Image (cartoon, rainbow, N blue to C red):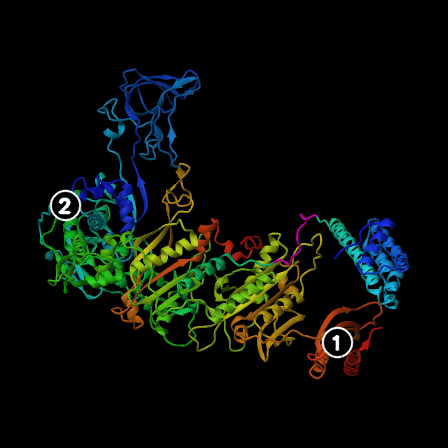
Amino acid sequence: MRVSLDWLEGLLPDGALDEMSIAELTERLDMTGTAVEGVETSGQIPDGVTIGQIKSKEHHPDSDHLWVTHVDTGEESGLLQIVCGAQNFEAGDKVPVATIGTVLPTEDGKGFLIKKSKLRGVESFGMNCSARELGLGDDHQGILVLDESAPIGTAFKDWFDAGDTIIELEITPNRGDCLSMVGIAREVGAVFECTPTGVLVPEVELVEQGDAIDTLATVVVDEPNLCPRYTARVIRNIIVGESPAWLVERVNSAGIRSINNIVDVTNFIMIEMGQPLHAFDLDRLAKDESGRAKIIVRRAKAGEIMVTLDEIERKLTTENLLITDPSGPIALAGVMGGMKTEVEDDTVDILLESAIFDPANVSRTSRSMQLISESSLRFERGVDPSGSVSALDRAAALMALVGGGTVAPGVIDIYPEPITERALTLRSEVLDRIAGDDIPLDTAKEYLERLGCAVTFTDDMQTTLSVTVPTFRPDLEREIDLVEEVIRLWGMENVPPTLPGGRERLGGLSRTQQLRGVIDKTLRAAGLNETMTLPFSDTLDLAKLNFETGEKDELVALHNPMSSEQAHLRPLLLPGLLNSVSLNKRRGVNDVHLFEMGKAFLTNAGRKLPVETEKIAGVLSGLWDRAGWNVASEPIDFFDAKGIIEQLMRELNIDRLRILEPKEGELSWLQPGKAAILMLGNDPIGWMGEVHPSVAGKFEIDDPVVAFEVDGAKVIKYAKAERDFSAPPRYPGIEMDIALVVDEEVAHKDIERRIKALGKKTPLADVHLFDVYRGKGVAEGKKSMAYRLAYRADDRTLTSEEVERVHEKVLAKLKHELGAELRS
Amino acid sequence: MSTLKGQDPAAIESGIAARLADAGITDQAVIDHITEVMVPFIEQAHKVRESLSELSNLAELDALRVEVLGKKSPFIAFMRNLGSLESDIRPVVGAQANEVRRSLEQWIEERKAELSHADLEKRIGEGTLDISLPGRAHPIGSQHLISRIRDEIIDVFIGLGYRVAEGPEVELTFFNFDALNHTPQHPARSASDTFYVHDMSGEDFEGPEPSEVLMRTHTSPVQVRAMQEQKPPIYILAPGKVYRRDIADPTHLPQFTQIEGLVVDKGISFADLKGTLDHFVREIFGPQRRTRFRPHFFPFTEPSAEVDISCGICDGTGQVDGATCRFCSGVGWVEILGCGMVDPNVFEAVDIDPEVYTGFAFGMGVERIALLRYDIPDIRMLIEGDMRFLRQF
């Protein structure tokens, strides 16, 4: 809401605003709940600008567009020589002169200091100012030539009726009453303890003349729930034309364009009193059988069509409330008028509507049509039905004044259930309990009275107030609303800060939350950087992955996505991460190590809310780090990701991770042979592998990317809280290395499992693969796997004979079952 | 322990004679014999002592030690044979021989310590590094800025006895709006502001919005669920991602991270809310920061307030070096969160008696705090995953 202080001043007792600076005013408004979003000042004329008279005007000797003027500014020391570039003045004109030392306003707020200067060799002792240079407007074509009566030597700001200050206020949705100048005056009055005068400027008297309104118009309200009050007047023989300057200035101050005198009056009253009005061209309204213009307030029929004032044809539904005449719709109630009955230059008679419409209905209509008007904004927040007729009367009188017409006698007023003032109570105990402060009840009483409530003590103990709420404050519905008003005026800054006393509460994280922290720290310790991507899923990205949902699953679809790329919620985190890898590579960052913990979404038929799965996903590409002076650097591969998963399992105390090869068609985005399903027992908890080069390529990534994604809730579920202790070995062990030559097909796990299978009966403590070799000395199709086996017993030092025996058994088993040969 | 005294044969002899005299041995022949046997050992010991200083390393020293004190050395052989001496002179000779041995051992030990020290010094000298060379470490990853700030805030409130509550990101309008006292026409419900999700239940739905399933627009539904599931006292913090239909630009994202707090207990007042948030602001932004509570309106709280903190750049003055503070636009305050006392209508929706319990709630955007704290020019940097951005935190 744009509030002109000039206008506001007229509504308050004389001098009420003069006592405070604008800074004080805006600060107090801020601190009482009416946030000030901006202050615009026009016409703040700086000190040092004096009224002067041009005594002489001569061509600059060295320029064909500059003038050398001598200006009388009333200084006894004589005329000022000022070089001037404007062309619009003559000797004898009076002009505002910025004398040396004046700071003129500039847009950047720094100001422009007038100094003695030389222009092409001629000295200049000041500046003859344009309107823009003084901050009075945009005109900078020439200097501001003043009226002849302007007194020479007088400070310009004392003579010139400077502009206005507009403060932009944020009106919260509960304070519809503040969407008017009268409402703002009341609020300012309550805050600053000054009651508005109640006098509206200009004062006009309503004079009724001619045929009574009942002979000219009639109104039927079919939907009293959606239109609790409908009032109307007729103004005749007006001349539609330009508005007088004061009216233009007022509507402009509110940020509304001047249209014509009639429309401007409706807007003026809306801003002044908060009641939206609409003027229909009476002659264009269809008539009833007795020749009277007939207004019917009804719901639209499904599919009914009307053209609103913005010249858009709108298809209506039964949700929409209409103002109609017998021929059809003439206005979208409370939102916008129709083209058909618009006031135009040739309009002579007017039917003026001042009505109340249901907030929810107006809101739905205006939002569904994306048609938000000054009128709909006010109706949405609630307009006081008690004020409809006074607004109507004042508007009619003003129209007669500015349009030269007459007001037909009588008012149509359809108001089946007049609103009553609400009666509430406020208990001192509740006020103090909510505030946490001791606010005297008589202070509360005074605040509420300032806000326009009628307040009495209900009891002799003076512990409870009986409060009658004025109809312009529909937001004050309950005791708590009164508490809010009192605290607001008491000043939140005056409430002492305390901390809640402690009973029955212990802070802390749940086990799941703690384990999430463990996962986060483990992944970071492993070198991954946490990132965050959007939860939306591009079906194109999913197509790049060849991703298909499971048989019963479906993607979660949005009704109203921002774009087709964001029409679904992500079923996995990988696409977002691949896009981040791609972005890094395109920006020249080749080494990428990212992880994200976030939700993935899937749904299926019959579900209301989708299934949300907490995912932990990572992507790695490039190197871990550049090679250093003492560190080599290897390109990241499958086993870097696997190592991270293994570390994670270790930290979560999960010891039964199994790796399965995916079946054909599973994990379609991974490269076959470099893909794995991660299992805990028989439960698949996620996957890992190298992204298929053709998939990476579709994300514009040329390098290998390894990725993983696991179900966070599952790993947290399987994490073992208890850790088992076993004493560190007391007896030394013996380590034996073996290099086995086996067929390529033989996997590490085949060997490891067989070695470990002996472990229970034998003193075998550890199996460690330390080399895999192919090439010279190893036949084609074979590889050499080198293991270090650690033998140890808990109760004695093993003898080498004992170890030899077991070791032979291991070798025999491997030879027998896998055809493994000892590499010589 | 005494060490051998004197070096010249006369002194050695008289020393031996004195010791024998002390032992009551006066027979000159015996004295001569003993002197004859002992003097070479003592002289040799002194020579060894002199030669020690010429040895330059521990290996030479060890060789010398073996030579003079090893099993095969003549001296040790002599000592081993002491038993064959006459019993009257044995103790005297034994004492004298032991003194020789102890002295040798002591001198060798002393020299050994010197050489060890020199050797250590030498090795240290040889091992001098260019300590300006970079260290060797596997790089560790960074926590995302938003998570970092979220965790800091959570820690503050855990210290105040709060627990962390969570809920789904896709929600029902009941939890997101209805139970939070949003009127049916509240603008936030509109499909232009809120993402609506297809309801797969097959249930009929009528209303101006497309569905009753939506992406939560705040974490307040977590509070409603908590109040339904748990009886007061409730002290919870609800952090999480929330979604609004904003086009991504330097100051907006369709997703952001919110942290809301809720307290429901007997005797909870606006003063408690103020004290709690004052504490929070000082912990997160620094002890010198002040707060300012401005009355505001939210559907789910009454009274409601917006909270500003004093600008950290101009310390609340609005001015930096005489010019308008760019950070707070000269206001001196920066808006940081919204809060208020839980509206009785919200309590009614979850069956808590507002005559018995009162409560407060507050909510803030973590991204906003991050942008304020680090003066980040474009919020989209937070979701790009640019390694160069992430690695800074």
> Which residue corresponds to the image point at 29% horizontal and 49% vertical from the top-left?
A30
User: Which disc number belongs to residue B324?
Assistant: none
Q: Chain of mark 2?
A: A
Q: Nearer the viewer, residue B270 or A156?
A: B270
Q: Residue at x 27, y 16 (%)?
A: A76
Based on the displayed image, in which of its 4 quarters is residue A725 positioned?
A: bottom right
Q: Quadrant of the C terminus of chain A?
A: bottom right
Q: Which residue is mark 1?
A: A745
Is disc 2 placed on a helix, strand or loop? loop
Q: Which residues are magenta?
A: B130-139
N-term-proximal mark, 2 vs 1: 2
The residue labelled by disc 2 is: A199
Q: Is residue A664 left or right of residue B152?
A: right
Is B136 covered by the magenta stretch? yes
Q: Are marks 2 and 1 on the same chain?
A: yes
Nearest the viewer among A353 and A37 is A37
Q: Residues within 10 Å of mark 2 (few under 14, many from 20)?
A: few
Residue B50 placement (x, y as % from top left): 84, 49
- The mark lying in front, picked from 2 and 1, is 1
Picture layout, residue A240 above or below residue A360:
above
Parent chain of label 1: A
Is A203 colored magenta in this rendering? Answer: no
Distance between mark 2 and mark 1 Cα atoms? 99 Å
The prevailing secondary structure element of the residues shown in magenta is loop
Q: Is residue B171 above or below residue A421?
A: below
